[in-house]
Amino acid sequence: MSLQVIRRGMLTTIQDLGRFGLQRHGVVVSGAMDSFALRIANLLVGNEETEGAIEITMIGPKLLFEKDSLIAICGGNLSPYIDGQRIPEWRPVFIKKGCVLSFGAAKLGCRSYLAVAGGFDIPVILESRSTYLRAGIGGFLGRSLKDGDVLHMRPPSDQSLRRTLLLSNKVGSNRFTVSNWSVGNDVIPNYQHNPVINVIKGGQYDWFTKDSKEQFFTSKFQVTPQSDRMGYRLSGPKLQLSEPQELISEAVTAGTVQVPAEGNPIVLLADRQTTGGYPKIAQVATVDLPVLAQVKPGEKICFREISLEKAQKLLRMREQKIQLLKQGLSLKE
């Protein structure tokens, strides 16, 4: 079973949930920018939620399926089409051999995730299939996909086969068929233009001036074109320290908000470095990382302070919803 890349899109890579446990050796975590969307796409096709999938950024690829396949697309709304016919996201789709999947305009968000039943036959490098572009490791030959690439797929699980059979029995003379159910809106993150992002005060929050602390929570910050998978560079009010201070480099994680000397915050994301020496004014709540990952360059974000306890509660609630979704999927079979 294979999939051929006819047109590569803007930035199309293989990602999973990343390389955890190796930062002490200087190995970047990498992985999906929107890990929630990747997890759900995999669950919908009967994969383990940690399986590698295709991360599609801004402008989507054009892909030829060379065998009947079960797929799911989750994340931002990048207008997916099969043979020119619009298909919905957040549900399983059975697609016949010879069909072409393409994408249109990015209507909401900027990243979408394509999972296929069985997953892609990609080598595991340092315990992950994720692509880390700067080092050229993982994924498909350590790089983004190019025109003419062929991705092979691994055999689907029994769960995938049962789900495929249910949909294939309904396809008839059509080129594809979709399930008559989808992931509920109460499970999907609140993707939106110019979102408000929940954060916890960072380790060096008290180093900043009173005005800077107020501006951080009352101003809008624009995501600049210099942003990438390593982090979002923001423009807005300049944030300043009360007095010059030096910080020994320490561990950072996804969502760490650092402030370099010039005063423009940087939010670290999937391809972040393993340590950082800039003062940290805040930490994005894990539950809001998927929302942040879907913000396009040029859009604006605001920050809202919440407690660590609230951040933990929100994350537990989301994980409970995912567990309920898993139970619901098993009942569908």
Image: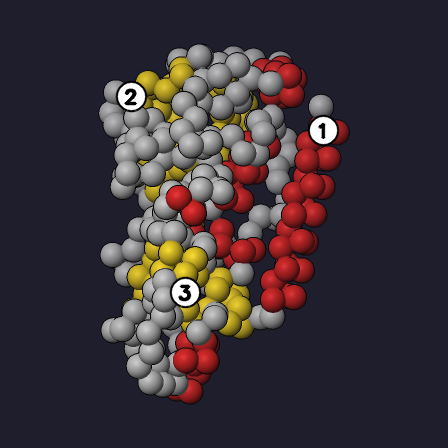
Residue at numbered disc 1: 330
Q: Residue 272 carries which label?
A: none
Distance between the alpha carbons at the discs numbered 1 and 3:
39 Å
Q: At x 43% / y 26%, what residue is drawn?
A: 124
Local packing at callout 1 (Cα closer than 10 Å; few below 14, some 14-19, many 20+) is few
Would you place residue 20 above or below residue 269 in this image?
Answer: above
Q: Which mark is residue 257?
A: 3
Tell me where residue 289 appears, x and y as whole percent: 49, 54
Q: Are marks 1 and 2 in contact (CB under 8 Å)?
A: no
User: 9 or 289: nearer the eye?
Assistant: 289
Colour scheme used in the picture?
secondary structure
Distance between the alpha carbons at the discs numbered 3 and 2:
37 Å
Foreground tag (1 vs 3): 3
Precedes in sequence: disc 1 or disc 2: 2
User: 141 or 95: nearer the eye?
Assistant: 141
Local packing at callout 3 (Cα closer than 10 Å; few below 14, some 14-19, many 20+) is many
- The amino acid type, in three-letter code, at marker 1 is Ser
Left or right position of 272 against 188: left
- The amino acid type, in three-letter code, at marker 3 is Val
Q: What element carries label 3?
A: strand
